[in-house]
Image (spheres, helix red, strand yellow):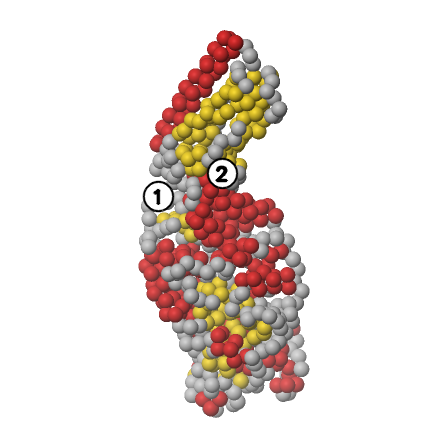
Amino acid sequence: MLFAVLGLATVVAIPASAEDVPTLSVVLSQVTPVSPSATDTVTLQGSVTNTSSKPVTNVQVHLWRSSDAVTDGEVLTEVLASDPANPVGRRMLQPENIFNITDVGAQPSQAFPSTKASPKKTFAPGESADFTVRAPVQGANGLGFATPGAYLVGIQVRGIPEDGQNQTLGRARSLVVFAPEASRPHSSVATVALLSSRPSRTGDGVFADDHLAGELTGRLRQLVTLARQPGVTALVDPALVDAVTDMADGYRVTGSTSPTTQGQQAAEDFLTQLGPVVSGGAAYRTLQGGIDVQLAVDSGHPELVELAAATPPTGHLLAKLPLAVVPADLKLGDNARNVLDGIKPALVLAENAASGTAVQRWSDDAESALVVPRTSIHDGGPGPDPTRSAPQLAGRLQATQFVQARPMVSLVSTSAQASAELVDAPWRTRTPLPALVAASGTTERFVASPQPAHREDRSWLDEVKSGRADLTAWGELVAKGNDAERLTQQVLPQALSTSWRGDRAAALRWLVASRSQVGSVLTSNKVNLHVVSKFVTSSSNQEVPVTISNGLPDPVHVRIAFDSENPQRINVADTDVLTVGPGDSETVKVRVSTHANGEVGVQARLTTPTGRAIGTPRNLTITATQAGRVGWIIIIASGVVFLAGTAMRIRQVQRERRGSANVAGTTGPMTRPACDGDDG
């Protein structure tokens, strides 16, 4: 098909023994320009490495090209999949088209020092050399590009292996686009920059690691630079903005007791560049933390998607932006439809549409648009390997965009992809997504191709679920419901971020660190319940002392609940809500009702005002007796011992806490809130 379409009558089979010996590896580092004009000269640069175990002589780099224009998407697909030896094309033989790695005849090496006294005859195993070759686009010695289209250019390295003959020992191919001024503008595309990062912020001014600082001077800087280009659309994660804003104000990395300034200036610069992008009319906010929508739905937690979709608070940089949903791997199942309909996004991006139309309707009765990106345009090529060098990525991208027959959406999230998109293409016109959607007038409805359900670690999902319960309990305990809801909205969607795929251990470490603001309650014994292990009553209604100590910096609001093994004999009444100040303790008397003599086990536990149990229950034994004077002596003595022991324990705990006041927050495993008994 390919060669019939291109009309390549010169194609012949090349014997493997002569032409396909992969002795030398060729890597392209630059092909400039990727979209040359008729008056340009195309330059190819790269390196050659002897990957064999034998030396090679007469090693010479040749610029190679095919003069057949590719103007059709199907033909381009065949070209990308073609054997490296086909089409044959032509090696160019002018001096500027050739680069000598070793001495070749009377011509000295251009890559290594070579003299008559010390010639460079061989290219040894493991040895590498850089090269540069070039050719004009047109003219008698030009590349021969005549009509607009995509063209193959590349490198062939000739040489003589030990015990062999002169042959092609290495190849590399790339694509360039020839678009004379008369053919411009030729193509309209929608370029979308996705600005997000793996979660790292664990609290106000605290980060689990410093990877974000590196991205702000690398990948994210590339992406925001792209987003500032005319016609480019930006999708921005609110969690990223929160993290960068925190970093710009000064921050600390977990494990360090002092602030760091490594990423502060980069964060300020990023926010400065992002401001015009957000206000430019072609930006959307994504779901908080890049939550994996399909995972949340498949695991029975669709409410986390609703949390992630909440509008940022007033004053937030992204508060006024419409919502866009970017699922993991750009794939959604039909079971996600109801959840997304509930949050009403302006855009949904998914590649697994049964139809390849760029813009579709998400559903019959929703205003959301479905946009279908083409991820394959970032795959690089053609072969042989390696196929993902910078010029190959840019060439594949521009060739695909040039030969398209309909609008195309390019979603960009990596530094390499951004670099490829930033390579100049004078024939290309970028259309913002809002304009593309408005102009489409499509009535085609999105139909998802079947997707396998997630096979996720249930223990991880249980950790996320328990994390939410713990945050809620903390909010009730210290009467900070709004703060707890804010933390829940920030933390839990990020715990299911698409960026954690394949690294649940890192996700768990981040989740534990993110709970550091409530860690004093959830992972250490700072709210303690003290009860005497044995108590004797001598009347049907008597009071028992119970003490609560609070080592938190906030007041706590708790109840004490009791469970009797035999309430018909002995019953203890639950308390009302009690408030214990920061660093304080309070002893209350609870009423014991006895209906018959005997010994009964009773369990005491702390709960939040709504009844959520916190900490470890404490057991006591209550004995009902009418023992008279002796009984009263036992009762009084047990009470005195309890109160004295409790006071000593409280003083001990306070001394311990004062001694560890400067220790950093806990990073231990996720546990329930714990409360001490007398045995600490």
Could you tell me which residue is drawn at 42 percent across and 52 percent down?
201
Regarding residue 626, the answer to whether it shows in the image is yes
Regarding residue 19, the answer to whether it shows in the image is no
The quadrant in which residue 40 appears is: bottom left
The quadrant in which residue 278 appears is: bottom left
Q: What x and y, as percent, mark residue 590?
A: 49, 26
Q: Amino acid at mark 1?
A: Thr
Separation of disc 2 and disc 1 at Cα?
33 Å
Could you tell me which residue is drawn at 41 percent across and 29 percent down?
586
- Image quarter of the N terminus: bottom right
Q: What x and y, as percent, mark residue 315?
A: 37, 61
User: Which numbered disc covers residue 257?
Assistant: 1
The quadrant in which residue 373 appears is: bottom right
Residue indicated by mark 2: 608
Could you tell me which residue is drawn at 37 percent across and 45 percent down?
256
Label 2: which secondary element: loop
